[in-house]
Amino acid sequence: MLEKMISDARKVDDYIQNMHFENEVITDADFSKVEFESVQFIKCQFIKCSFSKDSFYNVVFRNCILSNCIFTESYWRKSKILECKSDGSNFSQSCFKQVTILDSSLCYANCANTVWKESTISNCKFKEAFLSEVKFQKLELNAVDFQRGDFFKTSLRGIDLSDCIIDEIMVSETFNELKGAKINAVQAVGIAQRLGMKIV
């Protein structure tokens, strides 16, 4: 049903509003340059689909699989990603405003050059995700696993990482990315050891 609706929408205005999609299973589809507003995706599976340059306003993805999908240059506002698996997906150059990501997995996801404003990420996995050259503004993080994530040239000033896993994250040699970030004592010891300090 979704594929037909998008095909029909493209003939008019590329706009889909106030819809509910459940148990859709779609592979290798092109949904790029579509605007979704007040749409719910429940238990859907999108494998290797393109949502490039899409807009998501008040959209909910709940218990969905979004593996290896393309969301490059997408725009998200007041939307939610809940209990989803989006490992290996590409969100580069996207913008997230007032977005909530909860109980989801985005391991190996490409989030480089993204912008995050007034958003919340809780109980999620971002293992080995690419988060380089990202701009964070008023971001709340709770129990997020960033193990071996790439934060090169991403300022974490003002970000509370104390409840997160930041083991082996990739930053510049000077660790400038972590200046002004809030970390806990155990995290501080790990960073000090990486800087060559000896803890006594």
Image: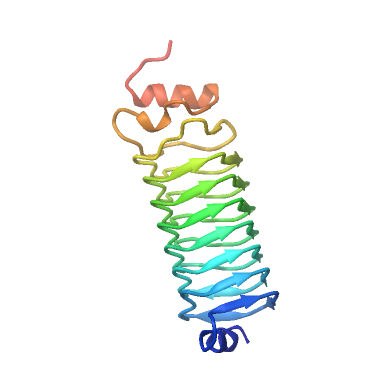
Residue found farthest to the top: 200
Identify which residue is drawn at 43% across, 10% down: 200
Nearest the eye: 184 or 190 = 184
Identify which residue is drawn at 35% across, 36% down: 171
Q: Position of residue 36 (x, y in %)?
A: 59, 71
Does residue 93 lie above or below 189 as drawn? Answer: below
Quadrant of the snapshot with the N terminus: bottom right
Identify which residue is drawn at 41% across, 36% down: 155
Side of 165 where 17 appears, left or right: right
Quarter of the figure with residue 58: bottom right
Q: Position of residue 28 (x, y in %)?
A: 45, 80
Side of 42 where 195 appears, left or right: left
Residue found farthest to the left: 173
Quarter of the figure with residue 45: bottom right
Nearest the eye: 132 or 127 = 132
Q: How many marks?
A: 0
Q: Position of residue 154 (x, y in %)?
A: 39, 40
Q: How is the image coloured?
A: rainbow
Side of 191 where 17 appears, left or right: right
Identify which residue is drawn at 50% across, 80% down: 27
Does residue 81 lie above or below 178 as drawn? Answer: below
Q: Position of residue 82 (x, y in %)?
A: 65, 58
